Image (tube, helix red, strand yellow):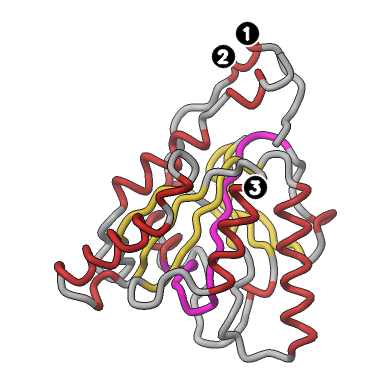
Amino acid sequence: MTGPTKSPEDALSTAPRSPNYRAASFLISASQPQQCPPDEGWEVAFAGRSNAGKSSAINSLTGNSKLARTSKTPGRTQLLNFFRLSDEQRLVDLPGYGFARVPEKVKAEWTRLIERYLQQRQSLRGLVLLMDVRHPLQPFDRMMIDWATTAHMPVHILLTKADKLKKGPAKASLMKVRGELAGHAGLVTSQLFSALKHTGHEELRATLDNWLTDTSVYDEEE
């Protein structure tokens, strides 16, 4: 990944503070990459199957149940939805994949939109990949991980709906995921998360804070 051309001194002087997630606000929806906000600053995308709870996780993190639309049927999640944290920091809710009850042609269009966004977006600093703790590492999940790690894009896995399992089985699922992805150590991390119980925020915020304040992108051409 490459980013805006700045000197290390400029990067240090303009590095943003850790964002206030509670101040998040809806910015814009985009059906094409050219409709996205200016490609500058720091951005983290949330991806996952359409039943993994992406919008619920964003709402839980920000403390705003109406920020990202949650529904059992496709809605705004057909688009790239951008949420403003500050002038240079954003969260992005990507279209869900998998269980959405839409024609195959529409699913293919969503997939192409996600691919173009992930390949072209220079301000993208990391990918939060959500999976149901009871059904982790489905084929498309693995595809996303393979793409991201090949591109040296860090991935943080949220095993969502952790409240659906008792503590022991939930922990076992987490350990299994970590074991299967041990070969990606350093690029892929994982944790348990429950939007219903609002648990897992601290670990998630720590990862997001690191990505959304990282100035190392400006040193890559040194």
In the picture of the structure, the residue carrying the numbered disc 1 is: 9
Residue at 64 percent of width and 74 percent of height: 76
Dot 2 or dot 3, earlier in sequence: 2
Whether label 2 touches label 1, CB < 8 Å: yes
In the displayed orientation, state which residue is furthest to the right. 34
User: Looking at the picture, which amino acid does disc 1 mark?
Assistant: Glu
User: Looking at the picture, which amino acid does disc 3 mark?
Assistant: Thr
Dot 3 or dot 1, earlier in sequence: 1
In the displayed orientation, state which residue is furthest to the top. 9
Residue at 50 percent of width and 63 percent of height: 67
In the picture of the structure, the residue carrying the numbered disc 2 is: 12
Up the image or down, 88 lies above or below 157; here it is: above
| Residue 122 sits in quarter | top right
Q: Secondary structure at mark 3?
A: helix
Please state the horizontal and vertical placement of residue 61, each as a whole percent of the image.
Answer: 38, 55
In the picture of the structure, the residue carrying the numbered disc 3 is: 150
**Which residues fall within the magenta stretch?**
40-56
For the residues labelled 3 and 1, the Cα–Cα distance comes to 30 Å
Work out whether residue 22 can be spotted.
no
In which quadrant will I find the C terminus?
Answer: top right
Magenta stretch containing residue 51, yes or no? Answer: yes
Residue at 60 percent of width and 85 percent of height: 100
User: Looking at the picture, which amino acid does disc 2 mark?
Assistant: Leu
For the residues labelled 2 and 1, the Cα–Cα distance comes to 5 Å
Please state the horizontal and vertical placement of residue 217, each as a whole percent of the image.
Answer: 64, 27
Please state the horizontal and vertical placement of residue 208, each as a whole percent of the image.
Answer: 45, 42
